[in-house]
Image (spheres, helix red, strand yellow):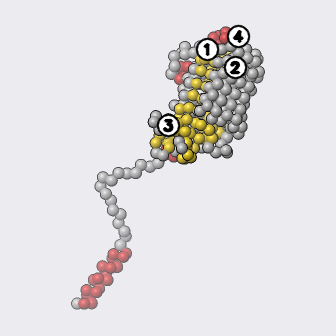
Amino acid sequence: MKSSVKAIVAALSSAVICAAPTVATFTGSVAVPAITAEAASNTATYLYGSNYGLNGVMFEINKSNRTADIVGYADTHCTNVTAPETIICSGYTYKVKRVRDNAFNGVTWITKVDLSACTYLESIGNAAFKNTRVNDLKLNTKLTTIGTEAFYNAYITKLRIPGGVKTIGNYAFWFNGLQEVFFQSATVAGLNVDTPLKIQSYAFAKNPGLTHIDTYRKVYDMEPQSFKQTNNVSWYEGVGRNSFYSQYKNCQ
């Protein structure tokens, strides 16, 4: 009898040791959402204070209205300034709304700026990219303001002004080496076809290589000398060419 009991105990012990472990399941448990590739690509790294970095670019966040400004570079190896429409900081989403004044002023290693994905971006501040080497520029269609000296003394040869822009500041594209400028239609940005584009004094001045202008913006409001020393333009195209030329010839 004792030997039979020992045999049963041994058999049970062996079954417990060899049995595959089971995983407990809980009915109604909340699944943890997967991190999407998009969210991962928009997630910024905390730097200090209210500043976060993403792809070498520094953002300053405003927690009260969930917006973010581009304020400079977070990495001296950053040659391309790019940004998504929103960034994620410490689990919260912020809309990218502005490039701050002087954000990259004098940062000579910046060569490319692509803000075409920033659908909430409203303005590029004064001297934001002054004295850089930007030669490739892409902007969001609904951008409304390009500040004074924003791209002063940069290296842009082909420029596309988005349809949403209402004001281009003084000296914004002064001495860029411009060859071609394309003014996009206001209707592309959802504005009335007759929404004027204000071009302030010297905005495009000192670009003697400028020869080609596409004018799909219909209404312009040019200040004196806004195109000073750009008297080699020989090609005009687009529905706004007559309106543009009537003012342009008095602003050289």
Tell me if mark 3 has few (under 14), some (14-19) or many (20+) residues whose alpha carbon lies within 10 angstroms of its own: some
Q: Is residue 36 above or below residue 195?
A: below
* Secondary element type, mark 2: loop
Specify which label sits upstream in the sequence, 2 or 4: 2
Q: Amino acid at mark 4?
A: Asn
Q: Is residue 159 visible?
A: no
Q: How many marks?
A: 4
Check if mark 1's residue and mark 4's residue have beta carbons within 8 Å: no
The quarter of the image holding the N terminus is bottom left
Q: Which residue is mark 3?
A: 62
Structural distance between the alpha carbons of marks 1 and 3: 35 Å
* Secondary element type, mark 4: loop
Structural distance between the alpha carbons of marks 2 and 3: 34 Å
Q: Which residue is mark 2?
A: 202
For marks 4 and 3, give the one nearer the viewer: 3
Check if mark 1's residue and mark 3's residue have beta carbons within 8 Å: no
For marks 2 and 3, give the one nearer the viewer: 3
Structural distance between the alpha carbons of marks 1 and 2: 15 Å
Residue 210, how many percent across, how many down? Answer: 73, 21
Tell me if mark 4 has few (under 14), some (14-19) or many (20+) residues whose alpha carbon lies within 10 angstroms of its own: some
In the image, 168: left or right of 189?
Answer: right
Residue 195, how many percent across, how many down? Answer: 55, 16
Residue beneath the point at 59% across and 41% down: 58
Specify which label sits upstream in the sequence, 2 or 3: 3
Specify which label sits upstream in the sequence, 1 or 3: 3
Q: Which residue is mark 1?
A: 220
Q: Amino acid at mark 2?
A: Tyr
Check if mark 2's residue and mark 4's residue have beta carbons within 8 Å: no
Structural distance between the alpha carbons of marks 1 and 4: 13 Å
Residue beneath the point at 58% across and 22% down: 165
